[in-house]
Amino acid sequence: MSSKITYKDASSHRTEMRDWFDYRGYLEIWQNGEVRLLRRHQSEGTPSRAFNGLDIEFRFSGPSARSMVTFVNSEEVQGLISTIHEGHSVAWDGHNHKGVFTDAAKEATTRLEAAICEYHEQCFRN
């Protein structure tokens, strides 16, 4: 699955200097295996696919998603992303389709969150 990613500005808002710190960066692993690094205005909330765990998202602060490209394309992080994707599935819980992780994917998720926090001074635990 290991595919190199690029930066995409997914925000529907215009960026003005006074708004700049209202943006958050996101690393998203989609159910189909696509990996995206983007930013959204904090008022846009969590997409329903991420809320239900169909797509996996890791959040970090500030407008520096571009600076994360090298980090995310590193061999270590690509390995973690691959483990997460391979250990992620979707199951019906009686009300919604929800994301489910194997133990290996849960461990890789924890390691990726820690790596993001180590690389990026401010981070947000999911």
Image (cartoon, rainbow, N blue to C red):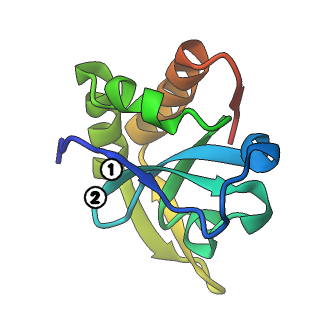
Q: Foreground residue, 58 or 66? A: 66
Residue position for label 1: 85
Helix, strand or loop at mark 1: helix
Q: Tell me, yes or no, whether the two marked residues, 2 and 1, touch with CB atoms within 8 Å.
A: yes
Q: Which residue is located at x 41 percent, y 40 percent? A: 105
Q: How many neighbours does mark 2 have within 10 angstroms: few (below 14), some (14-19), or many (20 or more)?
A: some
Q: Which residue is located at x 62 percent, y 38 percent? A: 63
Q: CA distance from mark 2 to mark 1?
A: 6 Å
**Which one is in front in this view, the residue at disc 2 or the one at disc 1?**
2
- Report the residue that reaches farthest toward the front: 17
Q: Position of residue 83 (x, y in %)?
A: 30, 39
Q: Position of residue 74 (x, y in %)?
A: 27, 22
Q: Which mark is residue 33?
A: 2
Q: Quadrant where the C terminus lies?
A: top right
Q: How many neighbours does mark 1 have within 10 angstroms: few (below 14), some (14-19), or many (20 or more)?
A: many
Give the answer, above or below, for where 22 lies relative to 68.
below
Give the answer, above or below, for where 82 lies relative to 55.
above
Compare marks 2 and 1 and give the one earlier in the sequence: 2
Q: Position of residue 33 (x, y in %)?
A: 28, 58
